[in-house]
């Protein structure tokens, strides 16, 4: 896995006619271990992808080598940037090999989804997606362009693994991909969907914040009462279909929580905002009502040093952009991400529990995993929406005992898991919102189990 700096300089470019019209731009390293490119998913709407072939691949006829499609949250956060260099890719933000890369268990496909995220871009601001379903349609188009041309990829099961708001995308694209497969438009095997700290039911999460923070002494009874009152308002707005109003009230609730808790970190409730090395949003910023920007700011200055070394934004707009060669000069990584969030504000507070139910009913393997210390997508809120599933196996699942999780020869409890039929849940101890970054060892073991990897 040691890579020299020359890795960033060598690539081969090609132009590929699209099934849907237009031209796709693609490139690869000379040894074929990496491929990347753009797909014009709609006229003037360009989506960027990056595929890594695993050097740890094991050929086992009984266990096909899997591919993981990683979807980031936000909406507007870049999987090509954050998921890749901060969490599970082969290199970290200092371009050093990651010992716990998920390439040890699968090939990795990162996509900047929806258009406008990361290196993906639109030429007309009217082309940003307005709903999760629109995003799923675009992403399914990209999958058709990548998989339908490549028989080797078609032999590997695809696992859609998501984090945060990416979980909503994973549910909708999972259903969209299934339909395309059934209609003969998409040639791939869907292995499963994994939802990590995912924003599946906003209502359940906002109701979890007050009680959770009261239990860990970050709120008092006054703060709890105010938080619950605003959560009730959000519930009413959601029930009336006033989703933009609910998004505005969500922002107000986050600011209330921040001020009442002396600025607890929404991604690790044991910390103050700004203490986490991957968080740059200060208390002063939040007091100015910038809750909507918290996630994008959270990922925009990751583990930076005074000279900029290790800063994700500097990396992606510098050496990585130069390596990739095909990023248009006028495209800045993350330059349109705020627009992505704004355009989706009408769908932001809409639940996707029914989509999870539909996946389960279709026999798709669904895994939910959650970091113990996450607040924004708390385990308490996740358990609440899981109990609302209409899946016929729910009661049997809930009645089962959990099994403890360990790492290697470690005797320390790292988490718990429970499974029944095609539904699986992982509780990851000591992790906040970004499970693979906070607990890389147990996350690697978990993804090996999820994908049934032969490695």
Image (cartoon, helix red, strand yellow):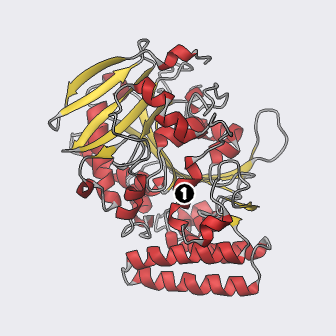
Residue under the point 70% across and 55% down: 402
Can I make out residue 421 in this image? Answer: no
Q: In this view, does 241 lie above or below 322?
A: below
> Closest to the observer: 220 or 303?
303
Q: Name the residue under label 1.
A: 295
Left-right relation of 214 to 308: right
Residue under the point 32% across and 52% down: 136
Q: What element carries label 1?
A: helix
> Closest to the observer: 174 or 81?
81
Left-right relation of 132 to 437: left
Q: Considering the image in quadrants, where does the C terminus appear? A: top right
Q: Considering the image in quadrants, where does the N terminus appear? A: top right
How many marks the image carries: the answer is 1
Q: Residue 278: image x %, image y %?
A: 65, 48
Q: Residue 145: image x %, image y %?
A: 26, 34
- Residue sitting farthest toward the left: 21
Q: Quadrant of residue 377?
A: bottom right
Instruction: Give the crowd class for mark 1: few <14, some 14-19, many >=20 residues within 10 Å.
Output: some
Residue under the point 43% across and 62% down: 357
Q: Residue 139: image x %, image y %?
A: 32, 45
Q: Residue 73: image x %, image y %?
A: 49, 53
Left-right relation of 291 to 153: right
Q: In this view, does 211 lie above or below 158?
A: below
Residue under the point 33% across and 48% down: 115
Can I make out residue 319 in this image? Answer: yes
Q: Is residue 285 above or below residue 416?
A: below
Left-right relation of 231 to 408: left
């Amino acid at each position: 896995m040691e890579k020299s700096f020359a890795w960033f300089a060598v690539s081969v470019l090609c132009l590929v006619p699209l099934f849907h019209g237009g031209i796709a731009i693609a490139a690869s390293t000379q040894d074929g271990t990496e491929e990347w490119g753009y797909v014009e998913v709609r006229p003037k709407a360009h989506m960027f992808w990056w595929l890594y072939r695993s050097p740890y691949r094991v050929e086992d006829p009984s266990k096909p080598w899997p591919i993981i499609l990683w979807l980031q949250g936000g909406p507007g956060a870049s999987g090509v940037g954050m998921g890749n260099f901060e969490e599970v890719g082969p290199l970290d933000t200092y371009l050093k090999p990651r010992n716990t890369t998920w390439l040890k268990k699968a090939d990795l496909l990162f996509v900047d989804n929806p258009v406008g995220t990361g290196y993906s871009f639109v030429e007309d601001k009217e082309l940003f997606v307005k709903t999760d379903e629109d995003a799923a349609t675009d992403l399914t188009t990209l999958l058709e362009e990548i998989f339908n041309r490549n028989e080797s990829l078609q032999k590997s099961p695809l696992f859609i693994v998501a984090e945060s708001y990416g979980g909503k995308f994973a549910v909708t694209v999972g259903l969209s991909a299934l339909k395309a497969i059934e209609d003969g438009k998409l040639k791939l095997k869907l292995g499963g969907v994994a939802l990590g700290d995912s924003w599946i039911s906003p209502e359940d999460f906002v109701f979890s914040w007050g009680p959770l923070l009261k239990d860990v002494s970050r709120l008092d009874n006054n703060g709890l009462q105010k938080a619950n009152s605003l959560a009730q308002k959000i519930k009413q707005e959601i029930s009336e279909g006033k989703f933009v109003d609910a998004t505005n009230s969500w922002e107000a609730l986050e600011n209330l929580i921040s001020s009442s808790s002396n600025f607890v970190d929404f991604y690790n409730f044991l910390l103050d905002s700004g203490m986490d090395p991957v968080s740059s949003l200060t208390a002063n910023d939040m007091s100015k009502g910038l809750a909507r920007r918290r996630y994008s700011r959270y990922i925009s200055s990751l583990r930076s040093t005074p000279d900029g070394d290790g800063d994700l934004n500097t990396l992606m707009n510098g050496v990585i952009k130069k390596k990739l060669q095909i990023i248009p000069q006028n495209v800045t990584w993350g330059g349109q991400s705020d627009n992505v969030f704004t355009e989706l504000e009408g769908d932001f507070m809409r639940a996707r529990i029914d989509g999870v139910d539909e996946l389960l009913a279709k026999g798709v393997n669904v895994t939910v995993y959650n970091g113990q210390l996450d607040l924004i997508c708390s385990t308490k809120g996740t358990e609440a929406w899981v109990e609302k599933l209409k899946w016929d196996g729910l009661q049997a699942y809930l009645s089962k005992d959990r099994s403890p999780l360990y790492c290697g020869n470690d005797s320390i409890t790292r988490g718990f898991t429970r499974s029944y039929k095609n539904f699986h849940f992982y509780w990851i101890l000591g992790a906040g919102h970004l499970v693979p970054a906070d607990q890389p060892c147990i996350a690697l073991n978990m993804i090996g189990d999820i994908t049934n990897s032969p490695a």
